[in-house]
Each structure stands twice: as structure tokens, then as C-alpha cells.
Image: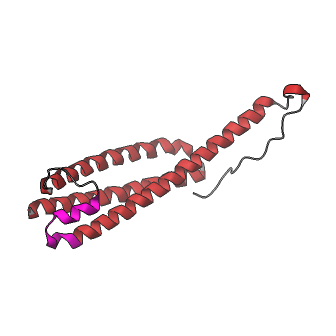
Amino acid sequence: MSQTAKRIQAELAREIELNRRLLAVVQQERDILLAGRHQRLMETSQRKVELCGKLAEVQERRRRLAAELSPDGEPPARLGELLALVPEEYRPTLREQVAKLTALAREVERTNQGNREFVQEALDTVEHLMAVLASGGRTQAYGRSAPQATLPRLVTREV
């Protein structure tokens, strides 16, 4: 049992490191978006996909190890539930690792969501501008002129 707990600690350490690297890539993606250097997005996206693949592998190994400790042979649904399965002497370290991992995962998600919103706003702006250009000031139904275009919500914004 203690050997399995040590292996779980090692997998959690790998998971923490991969999440740190993923956070750095997502933050770099944000910087690229803000700087308008979109040609670098492809490279960043590829690194993000690679890291996510490695992260999934590590998580799967951790789940298999946790299943070995579980009385029913199923891994716990939540990381916090893993603490009850390991011997007492491993709990403080695991608790700390789970807290770090949870905080990192939240930060990755928050930053990634900000990037997603920024890209969506940029797309909305482009679509709006395309609609304005496509109308070309022509009149719409019943002889009324097209409504005045409003400025895009945000052309740039801090993410």
C-alpha cells in the first residue's frame, strides 16, 4: 500500500508540473492574442494539445493507482477522496499536492476562458464589421436606411 501511495505522489508531482507548463502556455497564448501576433497561435496550440495529452496520460496512471487502493477497485471520483485511501503518513504531502493541483487547474481554466472570450469578442467584431461593409449603406426594407453601425464592443482588451 505504501509503495502505491508513493507512486501516486510521484504522479501528482508530474501532474502539477504539467499543469504549470500548461499555465505558462495558456498565458503565452494570451500575450500572443493581446499583441496581435496570431501567426504564433498555431505553435502555441500544438504545445497546448501535446501537454493536454501528457496530462491525460498522467491522470490515467494516477486513477489506476488510486483504484488499487480503493476497496471497490474504482478510483475515487474526486482527488480529495484519495486522501482517505492512503496511509496516514502520506496524507499531509498528498493534501498539499491536491491543493496545488486544484489551484493550478483553476488558474489554467480561468486564463483559458479569458482567452476564449477574447477570441469570441474578436470574431464578433469581425462579423459586425463584415455586416457593415456588406450593407454598404444600402437601404433596408420599406425604404429606411440601415441602422448606424455601433462601434465594436472592444477592439482590444486586457485578458
- Colouring scheme, one of rainbow, by chain, secondary structure, one colour: secondary structure
For residue 49, above or below residue 19: above
In x, y percent, where is residue 18? Answer: 32, 55
In x, y percent, where is residue 55? Answer: 30, 50
| 96 inside magenta stretch | no
Residue at image location 35% in from the left, 47% down from the top? 52
Can you tell which quarter of the image residue 87 is in? bottom left
Say how many tags the image has: 0
Among all residues in the image, which is located at the extreme right?
143
In front of the other: 80 or 115: 80
For residue 25, above or below residue 130: below
**Residue 62 in view of the camera:** yes
**Residue 27 in view of the camera:** no
Can you tell which quarter of the image residue 85 is in? bottom left
For residue 127, above or below residue 29: above
**Horizontal relation, residue 29 to residue 64: left or right:** right
Q: Which quadrant holds the C terminus?
A: bottom right
Residue at image location 63% in from the left, 46% down from the top? 121
**Horizontal relation, residue 142 to residue 44: left or right:** right
Q: Main secondary structure of the magenta part?
A: helix
Residue at image location 20% in from the left, 62% down from the top? 9
In front of the other: 25 or 150: 150
The residues colored magenta run 78-92
**Horizontal relation, residue 22 to residue 34: left or right:** left
For residue 153, above or below residue 99: above
Q: Which quadrant holds the N terminus?
A: bottom left
| 80 inside magenta stretch | yes
